[in-house]
Amino acid sequence: MFAWLNKNFLSLRAFYINTTWLIPWIMTGFSLCFIYGMFTGLFIAPADYQQGDGFRIIYVHVPSAFAAMFIYLMMAICAMITLIWRVKITAICMSCSGPIGAWFTLLALITGSIWGKPMWGTWWIWDARLTSVLILLFIYLGFIALQSAIENSRTRDLATSIMTIVGIINLPIIHYSVIWWNTLHQGPTISKLSAPSIASSMLYPLLAMISAFILFYFLIVVIRMRNQILMREIKS
Amino acid sequence: MISDYGIYIWSAYSITIFILGLNIFFALREKRKILHLLKKS
């Protein structure tokens, strides 16, 4: 079973061949979701009764924060597979995801700050949610630094996998920070198990933008993984 | 139509597009470099 899986999907060669046709599809999906989400979010969704048009920043802030956490989760899954089964493709996926996750975390912090100025009256506050997301950015930067500090690929994969798994403790802290502590940041809106407390006319553009950001991550990570595979081919 | 907080909204959207564009740029630049190396080898 594992040998079959490895031969058809997990080997570097199989991955390179299988993703050749995948890239245009991801690109199309991303473009459609992004254009729909941007247009409806900016021009069709009604203004919020308290925040006015300022709430439209959530259409870039929430998806970037969601993507930052999603990417870290993907990295942690890859790290576990790398540690247990020593699969090369997951190690490459983890190493390519790190910089993309760092960019999304930075974007979440910047857009959150831009939203915070008109709504809270400040660019930054040492709130539990903001601080835990800042820690996530530092974890990503630490991952990138560790990756570039170790020459030997086997040692590098081992060290970064362990670091990623240890860092996953930060994800539930980010998610539950608004529940566990009394924060200025608002509570969960769309991830509540009961009905989401947001009107559908505001929700659909948000879901489209979240999908667009996740597809964008897959697009970039697949391109970068293919680059890494080619690079290994040149070196060998 | 956007009537208030325009500067904040457009700044957030511009920065987002810039960062997404930067990611595509770096990925494609890396690809171009590797293809160049591959041709040489």
Image (cartoon, rainbow, N blue to C red):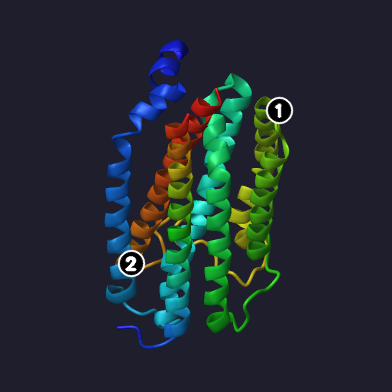
* Residue that numbered label 2 is attached to: A38
Kind of residue at disc 2: Met
Q: Nearer the viewer, residue A107 or A128?
A: A107
How crowded is the residue under tag 1: few (<14 C-alpha within 10 Å), some, or many (20+)? few
Extreme residue toward the front, this view: B40
Same subunit, labels 2 and 1: the answer reads yes
Q: Determine the image quadrant of residue B14.
A: bottom left
Q: Residue at x 49, y 59 (%)?
A: A64
Residue A207 higher or lower than A115, as above or below? above
Chain assignment, label 1: A
Quadrant in which the N terminus of chain A appears: top left
- Dot 2 falls on a residue whose secondary structure is helix
Q: Residue at x 44, y 46 (%)?
A: A220
- Dot 1 falls on a residue whose secondary structure is helix
Q: Point out residue A5 in the picture as x, y percentages from the top left corner.
A: 42, 17
Q: Point out residue A16 in the picture as x, y percentages from the top left corner.
A: 39, 29
Q: Nearer the viewer, residue A119 or A61?
A: A61
Quadrant in which the C terminus of chain A appears: top right
Image position of A160 (left or right of A24): right
Q: Determine the image quadrant of residue A117.
A: bottom right
* Residue that numbered label 1 is attached to: A155
Say if residue A169 shows up in the picture: no
